[in-house]
Image (spheres, grey):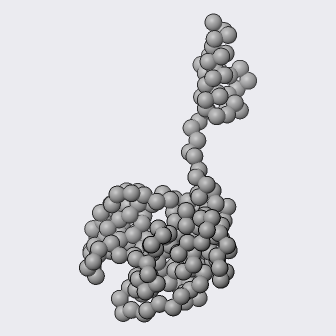
Amino acid sequence: MKRSRALAVSVLVLVSGTAATANAAGTAHGHPVAAPARHAVSADAAWCEQQGGKAETRVPYYTGTGNKITPLGGEREMCVFSAGDDSKIMIAADTLAADKPTLAALAYVRKPAGPSSPGNPSIAYCQGINGTAMFGNRPTDGGGWGPRAETDPSKATSACMFADGSVIDAWGLKYHQGGVIRGADLTKKFRAAIPGA
């Protein structure tokens, strides 16, 4: 009986992924000790955090007008960089960690000229360099990416998405094009070698 119990504890510890979490006898108060579950970190999230960012799962929201916010389907792992002046920049973790240049990375590093607009300059700039930050076809349609269960439309970060699926903070992109760094300078944080960097 003791041998089968020891075997059960050994299997439990092996399945949990770490033997260090069980005490020397492999039991606590006569019962097997299981290791705490670990949250698997993706390679993209790991790259984000190595660069000084914080990996967060974000979901898309339609904000329309007023205080209404509607969660949409899907989710994306984003990398958020924050600075001491409370500015932030968000980029999709897979965009930052891509092995090859992405359109978002090229737009950030090369700072192409774009149109100015009396409306939202970040959306106009994004569209002017062939991305989209729109969540509909009317000027009042809005949206962005925010934490799960968000209720405040202002917390949804507007993001510019390109044809290759790469995503970057629309305001962060526009400010960088104008010479202002928000959150962190991403130029040397991309895994891929970006031409023009």
The answer to which image quadrant residue 29 occupies is: top right
**Which residue is pictured at 56% across the width and 59% down the height?**
55
How many marks are shown on the rendered structure?
0
Q: Is residue 117 above or below residue 90?
A: below
Q: The C terminus appears in which quarter of the rendering?
A: bottom right
Residue 118, image x, y percentages: 36, 93
Residue 40 seen by the camera: yes
Tell which of 195 and 70 is nearer to you.
Answer: 195
Residue 35 occupies quadrant? top right
Question: What residue sits 34% from the left and 57% below the top?
Answer: 73
Q: Residue furthest right?
A: 24
| Residue 153 image offset from top left, x and y in percent | 35, 69
Viewer-nearest residue: 175 or 113: 113
Please report the residue visible at 53 percent of the width from the left and 69 percent of the height from the top.
91
Percent across and percent down for residue 6 are: 67, 15
Q: Which residue is more in the foreground, 153 or 186?
A: 186
Residue 80 visible in rendering: no
